[in-house]
Amino acid sequence: MSAWDSFVIVDWSAGNDTGGRPRKDAIWAGAVIAGTRREPVYLRNRDVAWNWVTDLIDRETEAGRRLLLGFDFPFAYPEGFARAVTGSDDPLSMWNFLAETLVDTPEGNDRFALAARLNARFAGIGPFWFNGTARDHPGLPRRKHDRTPDHGMSERRRCESHAKGTFTCWQMGGAGAVGGQVMTGCAFLSRLRARFPDRVAVWPFEPLSAPVALVEVWPSLLAGEVRAAEDPIKDRAQVDLLSRAFAAMPPDRLSRMLDIHAPVEGWILGLGHERELAEALCPA
């Protein structure tokens, strides 16, 4: 038997409320609950997502089930950033900083202003870049090449050097960018840890002894299968396929995927095991 009973994957968004009609570039959740696939759920903003996720955790833990809960944004910045900001290498200290500092509502958030304030802590210009607002935020360049190399931060985490097509934490906007997702997502997960202090553990930063494991995922690990699904809403196909793949993964293989030591930068669950994930979807 697997160490987990239910598997849920959340495709995240840092954008504003996306309205009542399901659409792309929004928050979606795919689930296999106690062995049964559920239809993907459209979550129009982060407040709606909060209610849905907290209800999910309450329901699964009260039923005595263990839950693997994945989110598709980096759980940490490159090494050195958390220490420069919080005085600690612990990525969860950075989560708490973001939860305390970021102003976030369904109608908007101040992620670009926060990126500018964080840049001011470093020499030169950077590491964050891209300003998606009409007004300037001094210290946050609009273009990558307007940064200067003396900010001192690595461009990528180690796992991202093995994951072709990933975007860096520093790019705050533009197609595919994850900088805003990291800020809003890690703040969200910090609040989740505070809401469920005894029921949630974060991989790979904490022992997975709690009934709910929060894990970092990247749906593009199944890029070929997502394309083959031909779903007009790519996010919907991604969460559906990845939740099903993890749920179908033989327990010993899933255990090997989780056997990672990355206490500062984190890791993408399933990275390097793309073929196994695809085979789990389509067993011989």
Image (spheres, rainbow, N blue to C red):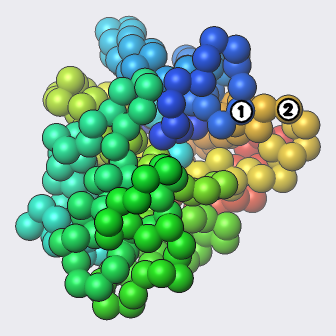
Do the CB atoms of the residues marked 1 and 2 lie less than 8 Å apart? yes
Q: Residue at x 12, y 62 (%)?
A: 86
SS type, badge 1: loop
Q: Residue 255: where, in percent of width, then height?
A: 48, 51
* Residue 57 picture quarter: top left
Q: Amino acid at mark 1?
A: Lys
Instruction: Please give left or right for residue 256 compared with residue 274 in the image.
Output: left
Residue drawn at x 53%, y 46% as measured from the top left: 72
Q: Residue at x 48, y 50 (%)?
A: 133
| Image disc number at residue 66 | none
Image-based side of 197 in relation to 180, left or right:
left
The circle drawn on residue 232 is 2
Q: Amino acid at mark 2?
A: Pro
Label placed on residue 24: 1
From the viewer's side, name the closer residue of 274 and 180: 180
Residue 61: x %, y % from top left: 33, 16
Position of 228 relative to 179 (above/below): above
Determine the secondary structure under disc 2. Answer: loop
Left of 42 or right of it: where is 72?
Answer: left
Number of numbered discs on residues: 2
Instruction: Specify the farthest residue to the left.
Output: 87
